[in-house]
Image (cartoon, helix red, strand yellow):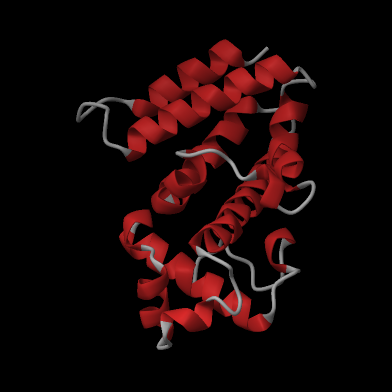
């Protein structure tokens, strides 16, 4: 995958995986990005890799374990996107929401996989969720409730945009700016 969001170095999410397990996750990511979560099965993943499905179970106990790695990728990559936005414009909630939106819209299937069901916190690398939230927490001056409200606004807007729920011709940029300004202190 030649995406600028995916680093070839081993980010937070991949350090514990074997090279073969990373290859499986990479193939799962490609399949997910091309076809959506509904098409990501152990059988389709095995087909993509040119192996039999039972071989995958040597590396992952089930599809949920593969999905956890994909969710960890999203958290790591979106954290890097938000950290870069924060470095460019320290304290800017608008810069963070722009980065968040851009990342989610570039990876709608991954975003949906990671956000449309309960977060498997117990299975994620330690500290990853906190790292992903840190730029927003800093932009909100450490106010947890404000950060939650800002995240809820950003997530709601982006998931509605991914699902095509806004009428054609709507100026979503203006809606994002208005919502962000309402939350920005």
- Residue located 53% across and 36% down the image: 98
Q: Which corner quadrant holds the C terminus?
A: top right
Q: From this viewpoint, which residue is outermost toward the left?
A: 168
Q: Residue at x 42, y 70 (%)?
A: 42
Query: Is residue 1 shown to the viewer in this render?
Result: no
Position above or below: 110 against 16:
above
- The location of residue 144, given as percent across then percent down, is 73, 20
Q: Where does the image place residue 112, in percent across and percent down from the top left?
A: 43, 45
Q: With respect to residue 35, does 154 lie above or below?
A: above
How many numbered discs, if any? 0
Q: Is residue 7 visible?
A: yes
Position of residue 119 in the picture relative to residue 170 (left or right): right
The residue at 65%/42% (across/down) is: 82
**Image location of residue 108, percent across then percent down:** 40, 48
> Does 78 appear above or below 150?
below
Viewed as shown, does residue 178 lie left or right of 146?
A: left
Q: Quadrant of residue 99?
A: top right
Q: Quadrant of residue 91?
A: top right
In this view, the residue in front, 48 or 77, is 48
Position of 3 with respect to 40 (left or right) is: right
**Residue drawn at (48%, 39%) of the image:** 117
Q: Is residue 33 above or below residue 24?
A: above
Q: Residue lying farthest bottom?
A: 50
Q: Nearer the viewer, residue 148 or 184?
A: 148
42 and 85: which one is in front?
42
């Amino acid at each position: 995958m030649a995406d600028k969001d995916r680093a070839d170095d081993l980010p937070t999410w991949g350090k514990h995986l074997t090279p073969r397990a990373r290859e499986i996750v990479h193939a799962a990511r490609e399949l997910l990005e091309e076809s959506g979560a509904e098409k990501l099965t152990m059988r389709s993943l095995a087909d993509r890799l040119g192996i039999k499905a039972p071989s995958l179970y040597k590396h992952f106990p089930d599809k949920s374990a593969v999905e956890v790695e994909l969710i960890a990728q999203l958290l790591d990559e979106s954290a890097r996107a938000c950290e870069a936005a924060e470095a460019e414009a320290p304290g800017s909630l608008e810069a963070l929401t722009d980065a968040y939106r851009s990342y989610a819209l570039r990876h709608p299937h991954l975003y949906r996989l990671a956000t449309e069901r309960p977060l498997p916190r117990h299975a994620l690398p330690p500290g990853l969720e906190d790292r992903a939230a840190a730029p927003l927490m800093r932009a909100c001056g450490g106010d947890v409730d404000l950060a939650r409200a800002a995240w809820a606004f950003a997530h709601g807007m982006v998931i509605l945009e991914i699902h095509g729920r806004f009428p054609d011709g709507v100026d979503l940029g203006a809606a994002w700016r208005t919502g962000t300004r309402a939350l920005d202190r």
